[in-house]
Image (tube, rainbow, N blue to C red):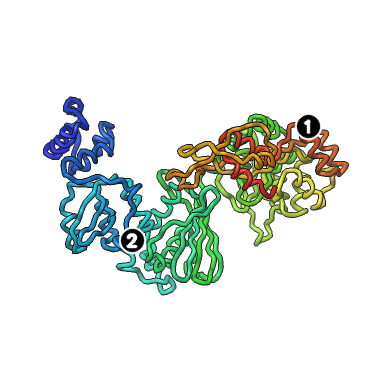
Amino acid sequence: MYSKETFLLIRKILTEAGVVSLSQLAGLEEELKYQEFNSYQDVENFLLKKKLITEEELLSAYSKYFKIPSIDLNKEKPSSDVLSLIPVSLLTRHILLPLRREEDTLSLALRDPFDISILEELKIITNLEIKPYLAKREDILKGIKEYYGLGAEAVEELVESPPSYPPKTLKSKEEVESLVEDSSLVSYVNQLLEEAYQKRATDIHIEPFSDKLRIRFRIDGFLYETKTPPQMKRLHSALITRFKVMANLNISEKRKPQDGRCRVKIKGQDIDLRLSTFPTLFGEGLSIRLLSKGSLMLEISQLGFSSEDLEKVKSLLAKPNGMVLVTGPTGCGKTTTLYSFLNYLNDSRINIVTLEDPIEYQLEGINQIQINPKIGFTFAEGLRSVLRQDPDVIMVGEIRDLETAEIAVRSALTGHLLFSTLHTNNSLSTITRLLDLGIEAYLLADTLRGVVAQRLIRLICNNCKEEQEINPELLESLGIREKKTFFKGRGCKDCHNTGYRGRTGIFELLVVDSEISSLIVKRASLEDILKKAKLLGFKTLKEDGLIKAEQGFTSLDEVIRVCEEV
């Protein structure tokens, strides 16, 4: 049952302000019988969930009733001299943010005007008069994170009563478990992972320096430093130890790099973490790769291929045998493309086997094998073994040497469809690379079906997208002579003021038909192969990027940046 007094007061405030009418609230009487309101927040949440009011309307009504002015924290920045006046635990518990000090008065933003007792408590703590302003809950919490650092409350609790570090002083398994299960430390790690996930980070870098601990997120290919509480340096060892235990690594080994992995659940999603520790001058550093099934398991139509290239890719995947290679530098999305190909082909009637180092994500229905060079189980050795497993489709993580290349070619010749990757700048140089490795030209011409070279480009943020004036000389240098409209991102809170949000692929797809094969056999120059490929509809990486810029997906600056070395 609901508290009638609580509801009646909120109703009085809202109706007097003209935010809602009595007739609107009367329609909820039957539903109210089954609600239990223990606080004013419960009533607010009920009305907000029913979409009878917005938070802005609620704060406007409170402002009139309590005679407390409202403030927009997107336009108001706290003064640095007031940030240390109130413990972070109080700020997060009561949703408060100090703003500025004027003589004997402290201005602060609050969300709950009913919480009068906290104002009296703050007078005692700060020895100042308190001048409150009303602000949105989300804006206050964002301000706490921005000005005090991620997980500031948990860090404050740990610093006030720190566990005994470093871990090498621990003597028993029970002591280790007690250390890493400290609720404040667990809370901080959870907040760190959740923040990275919400910001779409692919990597977390934890790096110790002489006077601070730096934490950076890689978002859309770029690293961004996240603010951490100043006391974080003191908890460096504890933080690394917590992650080591999660990944079942040796917590006492600090002199050598270690690799491990674990799985966590964030916002209901299973996320694989791939961890790598490394010794530095100021202690252990840690790199964490976040892998979610959603980011790796894309449909091939979601990768960014044009409609023409998509049909060509599907035609390549329908081949009964041969070799299809994906090329590009580290971090350009080759694994995602290969996984999408395998997912497209995955069928109970087909035996698919992969050789990977490491296995990025577990694929249901596919036999995945982890390469281990330390015991002599290389790609070449694994490929020999796989050929005895009656495979239809084989994926080799990377062709690194002549031995692997020769077995891959032999596999493609003997009726298998083989996928692999190479580190080359573009699709045409893949041919030269394989010939230079020592593959005979006639064998390469007979087995190579296609090469996909790719890069990742950032997409313009839809929230701040606007037209961009382009220098005519730049357009001329790019071969653009017709008048076209291009766009850029202005920068907003949705995209962290970068102007970009998300990434897609640009591709260079070389389909090896009979004419291209004959040129490979003759060891024709790349210029001759390019001319022939152009007649068949071949587009370079830069050309595909310019098409995406013309379509408004990305900016010209981004295309130039990504394709500069191609």
Residue 254 falls left or right of residue 66: right
Other-residue count near label 1 (Cα within 10 Å), few / some / many at <14 / 14–19 / ≥20: few
Q: Nearer the viewer, residue 354 or 1?
A: 1
Amino acid at the residue labelled 1: Leu
Residue at image mark 1: 535
Q: Quadrant of residue 463?
A: top left
Closer mark to the observer between disc 2 and disc 1: 2
**Residue 499: percent from left, percent from top:** 50, 44
| Badge 2 or badge 1: first in the primary sequence | 2
Which numbered dot is residue 17? none
**Residue 486: percent from left, percent from top:** 58, 36
Residue at image mark 2: 80
Location of the N terminus by quadrant is top left
Amino acid at the residue labelled 2: Ser
Please report the residue visible at 30 percent of the width from the left and 68 percent of the height from the top.
161
Q: Nearer the viewer, residue 68 or 33?
A: 68
Can I make out residue 393 in this image? no
Q: Is residue 304 above or below residue 30?
A: below
